[in-house]
Amino acid sequence: MKKRLFFFSALLFQQTLFAQLVDKTPAPVPVAPSVYDAEPYENPLVSGINRDASRATAYSFANLQEALKGDRDQSGRYMSLNGQWDFSFALKPADAPKDFYKSRVSGWNKITVPSSWEMQGYDKPIYKSAVYPFRPVNPPHVPQDYNGTGCYQRTFTIPAGWKNMNIALHFGGVGSGYKVWLNGKFVGYAEDSFLASEFNITPYLQEGENILSVWVIRWSDGYFLEDQDQWRMSGIHREVYLMAEPKLRIADFFYQTKLDKDYKDALLSIRPRIENLSGKEMHGSVESIINEIYPRLDNAKFGLLETKVHNPLKWSDEQPNLYTLTLSLEDSAGHVLEVKSCKLGFRSIEFRKEDSKLLINGKLTYLYGVNRPDHDPVKGKALSREDILRDVQTIKRFNFNCIRLSHYPSDPYLLDLCDEYGILVIDEANLETHGLGGKLSNDPTWTGAYLERSSRMVLRDKNHPSIIFWSLGNEAGRGPNHAAMAAWIHDYDITRPVHYEPANPLDQYYVDVVSRMYPAMYTPALLANQPNGDTRPIFFCEYAHSMGNSTGNVKEFWDLFRSTKRVIGGCIWEFKDQGLLKKDSTGKAFYAYGGDYGEKYYDDFTIKGIVAADGRPKAAIYECKHVFQRIACELVNAEQGLVKISNRSSITNADAYTVTLIVKENGKVILSKEIPAIHLEAGRDSIINISAYLPKRKETAEYYAELHFTLKTDEPWAPKGFEIATDQFLIQKKERTAPIANSNSPLTVAESPDAVTVHGKGFDISIGRIGEGGLSAYAYHGQQQVVTPLLPHFTRPLTDNDKRGWKPQKKLQQWYANDLQLVNTTVEKNATRVAVTNYYTLIHDSASVKVVYTITGDGVVKVDYALDVKPGLPNIPKVGMQMGINPNDSTIEWYGRGPLENYIDRRTGFEVGIYSLPISEFMEPYVVPQENGNRTDTRWMYLSDTKTKQGLMVVADSLLSMSAWPYTEQNIQTARHTNKLADAGFITLNIDLVQMGVGGNDSWSDGAAPLDQYQVKAQPYRYSFYLLPFDNRKDNVSETVKKAKSKN
């Protein structure tokens, strides 16, 4: 017995040395018991005091007409309290003003409500991907030495028409815990930064001016449930308003629609909650609802009001048909006391029996989703309705049909838009304990807090047809508290499945979906075919981590998702770069990320959006739009003009769209013609013949045909003519033109130990023989085009996926060593042609490069590149050449894929054509500078002086990848922010045969690497291109290209 006791005590001693947090931070010293004097913000049993039950978002109207309009501002029963409030801030609770709520304050600063106070100059924003922004982490105890505390106050006067009505005070969202007083009296307390809390303030009101005071603490004990990957901000960041209702009111209501087996007729069931706040006894039909009898066995019937609806229009993401549901409450004399309304959609959610695919109203539906947190680069978490509208419109316009609210409920206005636009929503509880794992889910003192996070979300959002899944939160481990959350939801709402990714790897019984993050290409099949008897649908709640230059192989993912049983889709991480606009000491603006505000605990894992921080769509989202489009076209037979049309829609016929055929000859549009609508039912394929519309073609030209599908009518989210799908196909390759006579202009060659210099009519060209050699000078009519030599080049500036993830600078380090050595230079010449060859070796003679510069009398330089490698070398980052050219050549015109940057694993959404952009728009200004601006399938590129129209043309002998920056590669590589990029004094021009893809399955492991088919194997490579001066005022591009390609 003694031995056992000793052994047990040793274990107890050792346990105090163990880490509590997932990052192995040592556990804090426990707080010793003391006389009870706890504040609510340090009591896990208290997440709200005196606040009303959460309820569906609905506004009180005086009559049916106003309720049908649904304009709360014109209801006469709504008063916004947004605007300027008096404000006092302290860095810790002890320094905040005491008893300020007892009287009207004076001399305080003003602050805008709603706002994040860190974006108003108080304290600092902190970015944490996970593991809390303070230490120690000792729930439920919060920091006392540094824990920002804001005190707010304002006054209001109740309208005379609100006399004898019940008044609710509504806070849309406050981070993270707050106390409320009215006229010096304590009203209540609330937690949950992203859900509304309402207080009945009727007993607290007085005639005339009323003084509203709010005390907000940055980190309450509720914050231990809010360890999400985001900027950690505080304050009253969502709207505040008052709403008047009669004292006998429709407090809440919940409707459900059940479609019959043919998805035709529906049973509409409504459960209203009527509340009598008059203090008087009520009679009549309403009394049976107020005092509903619940049976001893089973539960009360859901539908207190029910009706059958014959063949209503159904709601789906493609056809979001909405009705307006109104509930009217009348007194015994027939006078309307109150009308409330909401949008109603008839729809069903189920999973197909044979393969568990998602069915909306019985129709196969995939989730083309994106994760969307709240973010604005200037306002932080305090978004206006205009901000939310812009986000949701962008999401819908780029063919996304699903939003995961990550990782907390959004403002209800976003849900209104999703109802209207047809966007499927995964509504997620504001619960993440990433740093603590599942610790609190296994602690019964936190059960109530967990249940409130989920139940209050469901109670608020239950009437939105756009919501198809409830989610228990994110990355919070699992335990009995999660099981309790799921059980409550399943019992309360039988119409929607429950989602929660951390329920794996055993995929607990209480979730209805098998959810995973960041799959590899093998993951879908692996999950779908596990021999464990699980047939639940599979959903990738986060995939394609879009950090920096990323989001490769989305097409490959969706080829797998569509073809693998049980897989229903996924949500890309994430919608918007979470950069904050900041200025450096010189006043130069840049986007800041974690660590830029002097935070003690932070992560710099901040910039991961498919749109920029200001909402500007980046190249990645264009790729998504193409992969997700509902109409796909594929060339079957070019000679016969046969094109296969696939309608991936769930219910929409292809004839709902206007179809335009565009034909390009050598990149220029020569035909744009609307063709007859294509009648093709959803889920079907068909072959159409476009040959009758095609113009006569020249044998020596290249032709592409494109089919564009656009909206026939205005939609709430886009105007008539907006493009929803397009595909391009090569219908004729370009035949090589017959060589024309070379210029007979004589050349003069001067050879020295340092260089070979060639002089011709109006030009001088030098190729080095020492150092690294290369084309070092190219002057045309006195204007120098080359600033730094044209040299073989094998690297790119590291992307986030490169640097943080798979680390090619280590795995492929031989190519990053930059040990290129010029070993020999030879010259072959005659009167009108000179060929200078640079021979290089690198990687200790394991690879060699030969570059031949052939110069003719008209100044055209043909560059022939040959790379040979010995066995055993790793893959190559890229095969190409790099040079510095005249800095004035800043307008870029090219024939290739565009208009935005594209890479070999992210280019299906970019059509081949002729484009022109200034270099400032040609590049993608990633918040963290990295590889950018590449254009694949480039036939030619012309860089010119905006004023003189003179410049340098590069003509490819094949299809090249090209990019240009006004910075050096080294500067891009080392700069941490865009304000640290310095003009190099020249334009870096990359003329590459091929560059590896961008990858991005994740950004922290080998999974970040491009797929194998998008890596560049270590093997011999050959390619050629031409350099020639060009004057856009007098030279013709087509003729110049012909001229260049005749130099053989």
Image: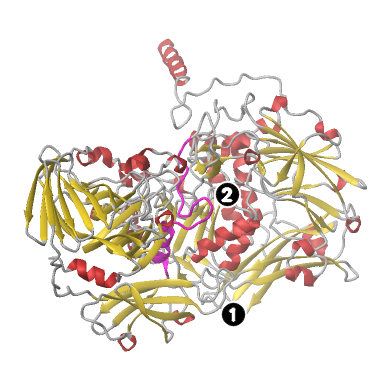
- Which class describes the residues within 10 Å of circle 1: few (<14), some (14-19), or many (20+)? few
| Cα–Cα span, label 1 and label 2 | 43 Å
Earlier in the chain: of badge 1 and badge 2, it is 1
Question: In this rendering, does residue 355 appear at all?
Answer: no
Mark 1 or mark 2, whichever is nearer to me: 2
Residue 693 in which image quadrant: bottom left
Residue under numbered circle 1: 311
Is residue 354 visible in the rendered image? The answer is yes
Say which residue appears at 63% left-offset and 23% top-offset.
145
Q: Where 261 sits versus 617, above or below?
A: below
Q: Give residue 665's position: percent from left, percent from top.
A: 30, 77
For mark 1, give the secondary structure. loop
Residue at far bottom of view: 692
Residue farthest right in this picture: 207
Give the residue type that dot 2 points to. Asp
* Quadrant of the rendered image containing residue 733: bottom left
Is 622 a magenta residue? yes
Q: Residue furthest top?
A: 2
Q: In the picture shown, does residue 362 fall above or below 799?
A: below
Assign the C terminus to one quadrant of the image.
bottom left
Q: Position of residue 876 (x, y in %)?
A: 21, 47
Q: Which residue is more in the foreground, 372 or 735?
A: 735
As drawn, is 901 to the left or to the right of 379? left
Residue at 29% over, 63% down = 1030
First to last magenta residue range: 603-629
**Residue annotated with mark 2:** 376
Question: Is residue 979 left or right of 813 when viewed as pictured?
Answer: right
Q: Which quarter shows the N terminus?
A: top left
Q: Amino acid at mark 1?
A: Asn
Category of crowding for the residue at label 2, using alpha-carbon neighbours closer than 10 angstroms: few (below 14), some (14–19), many (at least 20): many
Residue 400 belongs to magenta span: no
